[in-house]
């Protein structure tokens, strides 16, 4: 329980202090390499700040942040991980509100050769508070269903992970 309490404190700090970090972004940039470098370095600054402020939390368990730059709208979308996730092999895709629930969305490479990726939608801090699937996520996405796994699949597709 102590890990979750520390995670929540770190997340709250991040929510309150994210504004100066995202002010460094310049949307509408024409150079994708500069855009990549800005995102990478801003994420590194955020991680280093959290490590310095919360040294008792292992680096892999700190709250994750995900940026999406929307050039046409000239805006930066920021997702901050809401729920504690102890799985180290997952990639945080972002958070989404679907229905009345908030989900943290992840993907990871599958250990089963029949599936390339497994998608996870976490809706609480507990070990059992998640949905996961691979072919289900893909099928739901392509039929246009708005489910946590379909949204995770769409985010991974948009980010070029799959």
Image (tube, rainbow, N blue to C red):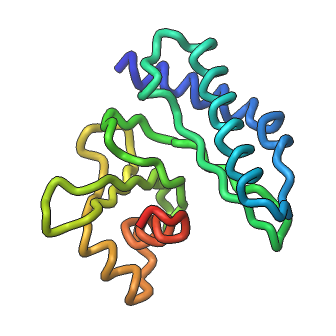
Q: Position of residue 4 (x, y in %)?
A: 41, 25
Number of labels in the image equals: 0
Q: In the rendered view, would you say 145 is above or below 79? A: below
Residue 17 x, y percent position in the rendering: 75, 30
Residue 109, quarter of the rendered image: bottom left
Residue 30 locus on image (x, y percent): 83, 64
| Percent x, y of residue 153 | 41, 69
Residue depicted at 83% across the width and 70% down the height: 73
Side (left or right) of 144 relative to 36? left
Q: Nearer the viewer, residue 25 or 33?
A: 33
Quarter placement of the N terminus: top left
Q: Residue at x 52, y 33 (%)?
A: 63
- Residue 39: quadrant of the picture: top right
- Residue at position x 86%, y 52% in the image: 26
Quadrant of the image for the C terminus?
bottom left
Tell which of 115 and 36 is nearer to you: 36
In the rendered structure, the answer to whether residue 103 lies left or right of residue 139 reads: right
């Amino acid at each position: 329980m102590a890990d979750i309490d520390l995670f929540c404190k770190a997340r709250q700090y991040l929510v309150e202090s994210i504004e100066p970090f995202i002010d460094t972004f310049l949307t509408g940039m024409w150079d994708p390499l500069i855009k990549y470098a800005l995102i990478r370095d801003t994420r590194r600054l955020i991680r280093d700040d959290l490590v310095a402020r919360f040294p008792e939390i292992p680096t892999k368990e700190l709250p994750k942040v995900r940026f999406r730059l929307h050039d046409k709208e000239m805006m930066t979308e920021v997702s901050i991980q809401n729920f504690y996730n102890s799985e180290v092999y997952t990639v945080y895709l972002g958070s989404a509100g679907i229905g009345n629930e908030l989900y943290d969305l992840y993907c990871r490479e599958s250990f089963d050769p029949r599936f390339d990726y497994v998608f996870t939608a976490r809706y609480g801090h507990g070990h059992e508070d998640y949905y996961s699937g691979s072919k289900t996520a893909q099928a739901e996405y392509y039929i246009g269903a708005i489910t946590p796994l379909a949204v995770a699949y769409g985010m991974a597709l948009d980010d070029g992970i799959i």
